[in-house]
Amino acid sequence: MNVVKKNSPLVIALLMMTIIIDVMGVGLVFPVIPEIIMSKTSPFFAQSVAPASRYFYYGLSMALWPLGVFIGSSLLGKLSDIYGRKKLLIITILGIVLSYLLSIASFYGTSLWIFMFSRFLCGFFGGSFSLAQAFILDISTDDRRMKNLGLITLAASIGFVIGPLVTTALSFFAKTPELSSVLPFWFGAILALINVLNIIIFLPKVPRASVHQDKLNIFKLIFSFSVMFTDKRVRLLALCFLFLQLGWGYFAQSLPLALEQIFHFAPAIVGVFFLLMNVGYLSSTLWLQDKVLKKFDVVTAMVSIAILVSIMLAISAVYVSPYVMGFVAFFASLIEIILYTAVMSEVASQVETHEQGEFMGGTTSVFGIAWFMNAFSIGPVVSESITAPFYLASLGLLICGLFAYLYKMKIQKGVQLKTVEA
């Protein structure tokens, strides 16, 4: 087997294409879930079903995806350390194809529980992003780590931009609301199949780090993310990342529901707001991120951005209008993605090469925990106030900033101790 060169442009380009196609599928589906659950034409509910019940099932449908991410990501990340990134990428994306097909079957069979299971399955096999991150770290030199991680984030941003655009376009071609809801799942399944073929044909294998292979314990693997909170090297970063995802998850998962319930926007218009968010991600990755991280050190940027995003999310809760939500969707996304990339880079810099699959899987599990917690609580929260999740989102980012500040103090203290010892 040929050894893949460090910073190989071929591997980076192929991984970017893999992420673009994979993330497109996520962006395709999110804008239509409020229509599937809340509308009068829902395939799962009679028109007489009360809004409170629908809120519960909306929260559940949003929560099962990150629950699957939580259970699957650490498991798949660790297995990729042992059996290879390419093999696990193929398995995960084939699982995503299956999840989309089950979603489609649930619409035609009017089975709410098959739909719910398909959302869980989609999350469980949705580990390709963390696997691609680990793959990138495998072939990155220290001086290119941040840049290469940024390229993976750029690919995700491109995929997120294209996904809502396709959903909006498909809604214009659909002759009925039912067809408008199911078409994104068909499109996602086809994209995932293309992705699998792309990986099988073009993506080379990389030599695995030598690791000691104990007998696999599935339970321990699923909960191996706990090392994020017990390992002193990354504990504060893990808490920072947890509250980042708790806060941002409340905003991202509540936004489509608020737009549908307050302003009665159709999925095509909801897709436009997701497009604004994702154009923010893309603009930041292409232009703003490098400028910010050249002017400020990574940890200072983490603290400042967390506070700024917290303020923006609070504004969206206080001033309820589509214009304010559109403004926040774009500008908060523009800088939130810098915070995300900075935290991931700091985690990667603190661990050894052979641990990176496990820790990248661990961060994805933390994401899953956070999004499961806020998605499952969205139902009862919005029953009290449709904008309450935006306040919780603001609080989450504020706490994220606090842990980033504590990490900064720890780093500065460590530097001072080294200076004294020297």
Image (spheres, helix red, strand yellow):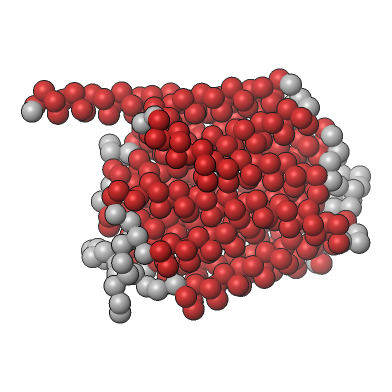
Q: Is residue 184 left or right of residue 178?
A: left
Residue 353: quadrant of the picture: bottom left
Can residue 389 be seen at all in this image of the molecule?
no
- Number of marks drawn: 0
Q: Position of residue 242 (x, y in %)?
A: 47, 37
Q: Position of residue 269 (x, y in %)?
A: 80, 44
Q: Position of residue 161 (x, y in %)?
A: 65, 51
Residue at the spot 60% in from the left edge and 30% down from the top edge = 393
Q: Is residue 359 left or right of residue 277?
A: left
Q: Residue furthest top?
A: 318
Residue at the spot 65% in from the left edge and 41% down from the top edge = 277
Residue at the spot 13% in from the left edge and 25% down from the top edge = 419
Residue 93: quadrant of the picture: bottom right
Q: Position of residue 37 (x, y in %)?
A: 79, 49
Residue 78: quadrant of the picture: bottom left
Q: Is residue 363 left or right of residue 259?
A: left
Q: Nearer the viewer, residue 117 or 411?
A: 411
Against 418, is 63 above or below?
Answer: below
Residue at the spot 53% in from the left edge and 55% down from the top edge = 155
Against 382, is 32 above or below?
Answer: below
